[in-house]
Image (cartoon, grey):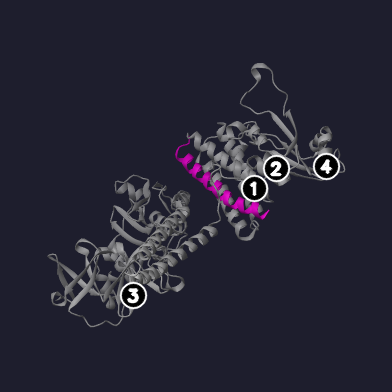
Amino acid sequence: MSELLEQFLIEGRELAQQATEDLLALERDPADAARLDSAFRAVHTLKGSVALFDLQPMQRALHAAEDLLDAVRAGRLGVGRGVIDALLDCIGASEAWIEALARTGTLPADAPGRGRGLEEALRAPLQEDSGAQPASAEPPSDASWAIALAAAEAPAVAAAHAAGQEVTALRYVPAADCFFLGDDPMALLRAVPEMIALRLGARQPWPDGAAMDPFACNLVIELLSTAGEAELRQAFRFVADQIATAAIAPSAPASAPASASEEASAPGGAPGLGGRSLRVDAARIDALMDLVGEMIVAKNGLAHLVAQVVAQLGEADPRLARALGESQAGIEALAEQMHRTVLGVRMTPLARSFNRLPRLVRDAAAELGKTVVLDIRGEAVEADKAIVDGLFDPLLHLLRNAVDHGIEPPEARAGAGKPAAGRITLEARREGEGILVEVADDGRGIDPARIRQAAKARGLMPEAAIDALGDEEAVQLVFRPGFSTASAVTSLSGRGVGMDAVRAAVEALGGRVSLASRPGAGSTIRLLLPQGAAVTTVLLVRLGGEVFGLPSDAVAETARIPAGRILPLRQGEAFVLRDRTVPLVRLSALLDLPGTPRGEMVRMAVVGSGAARVGVEVDGFAGRADVLLRPLPGLLSGMPGLLGTALMGDGQVLMVLDMPGLIG
């Protein structure tokens, strides 16, 4: 049962999300029959999966939702706001119940009352529709069918019992419209394991001639199998509400079965998943990733040893030295290929997080009396699972801020000559080795004067320092902890927790946040994130007795210049590189470490590009290395100036520096 529950939790979330997406799309286009059918299938399958467990409130609510959708599909009810609201409330409650099951194994104490309320709300539209009937045909509640079947197939039952096998009876009454739901009764029968008897009958008398509806299923299917009940329920998991099972007692094949269970099933795979898909516990992938990381560390250690051996062999045995070098290069290539492969297994589309957001935006806009259209683009872009999952909370903050603070009320938009419906765009795309996620709105934008006023009221900085800020710098104050311009606390804002939490969450993922805004024209927030935990090439630099790593993609070039060419510039120093003045900073000063006396030649790494280039003075260079960058743990997470750590081949821990974060 624990395995079935684990499977149900996974697939229940997928089905609920699919139903939500379909219902929101149906609200935008009520004539979209494909979306209506998809929503019905998702609710139908979820209801069937719930039947395996004692979750009556959830099952009754979903059954009512299925009946309501069936009435809409039949054209007896229209797709109105009230219908969509009731269905989304049911799906939302189902999602909450699924999460409660994951945490505690039971439904919340208020589930029965909430379930009754949902059922009443879902059946209210059906009261005016006398033709609305349940979508499924329910199996009979007694076990007389199993008694009759066991008696009719007594030889087969006796032979199985004589061989020491159990016998299970199953009765399947397909829904009349099963063909339109994607159910194939004959295909299900072919999947039944160890079937020893089969009987087909009619649910209702067969009509004659033209009255025959070839698209309606009129079958009653009864069978016997020597497989267990769990195996049979697995085969019929998508039509769980249409089956009944019973165990046939060996001593009395023609009497009442030893046990019977109705409407039971094991939840099955999500719709559309083929046989080539395989579910793997994320913890196993994480463990495999850790092993690959250790392999890269071992590979670096091997390279260190090979370099020493080759240096010693040298001219003594050049063939052996060359063979060692070739073997080491081959191991490096295999380790990197394995890392890329395992990293690819962890990659998942951003849709995993993006698709959960439209409903939340809809609810937030409705609460504030606003109309908001959320345009999502690039949800197929893939990133590491940890990035995708960790992105949901900051995106939720950003979208709530956009709805609450960005999008104006309808009357204000009308006065500004804007469409009544505000528009928020959530877009993702690949950028270099990472991904860029943008949240843009066409709202009121951010007023720097209002930001300064709010910052002074909250005492975030001395007033003179706030007045000295430029408009772009003032706008960045929204990232300060405790900052808020809300005049009242609501369910969406006003508590001073928001943009600072966004920055912290994104930096914890190894990303950066930037904000641009124009008063009256809207705001755009850009999240630049790594695509995943990848092998990073770093430039190793020496500072005193320490070695630090600089990401190679942050270093434009390295240089050695005479100390005499370094000139004072305002409060700092600069030098001329190819007819361009470049500021110079000492790495020791950036890290607040003791510096060493400057020699005749100054070694530096030039970071940045164009006019933003800066020279970073170091004591020396120690080569390059491919490392598996690990984020900083615990209290060190989010520490400015550090991207993470890496374990070197000689066992030393390398600190990898965030140069833009250090330089500012």
Which mark is first along the chain, 4 or 3? 4
Which tag is nearer the camera, tag 2 or tag 1?
Answer: 2
Q: Label 4: how many residues lie within 10 Å, few (<14), some (14-19) or many (20+)?
A: some
Mark 2 falls on what kind of element? helix
Residue 638 visible in the current orientation: no
Provide the major secondary structure of the magenta segment.
Answer: helix
Q: CA distance from mark 4 to mark 2?
A: 18 Å
Which disc number belongs to residue 232? 2
Q: Is residue 340 above or below residue 219?
A: below
Mark 4 falls on what kind of element? helix
* Residue, disc 4: 161
- Stretch of the chain drawn in magenta: 1-30
Left or right position of 57 against 384: right
Q: Is residue 469 above or below residue 348?
A: below
Which mark is first along the chain, 1 or 4? 1
* Residue, disc 3: 547
Q: CA distance from mark 2 to mark 3?
A: 63 Å
Q: Is residue 384 above or below residue 623?
A: above
Q: Label 3: how many residues lie within 10 Å, few (<14), some (14-19) or many (20+)?
A: some
Tell whether label 4 touches label 3 (CB within 8 Å). no
Q: Label 1: how many residues lie within 10 Å, few (<14), some (14-19) or many (20+)?
A: many
Which disc number belongs to residue 50? 1
The three-letter code of the residue at mark 2 reads: Leu
Q: Label 2: how many residues lie within 10 Å, few (<14), some (14-19) or many (20+)?
A: many
The three-letter code of the residue at mark 1 reads: Val
Which mark is first along the chain, 3 or 2? 2
Tell whether label 2 touches label 4 (CB within 8 Å). no
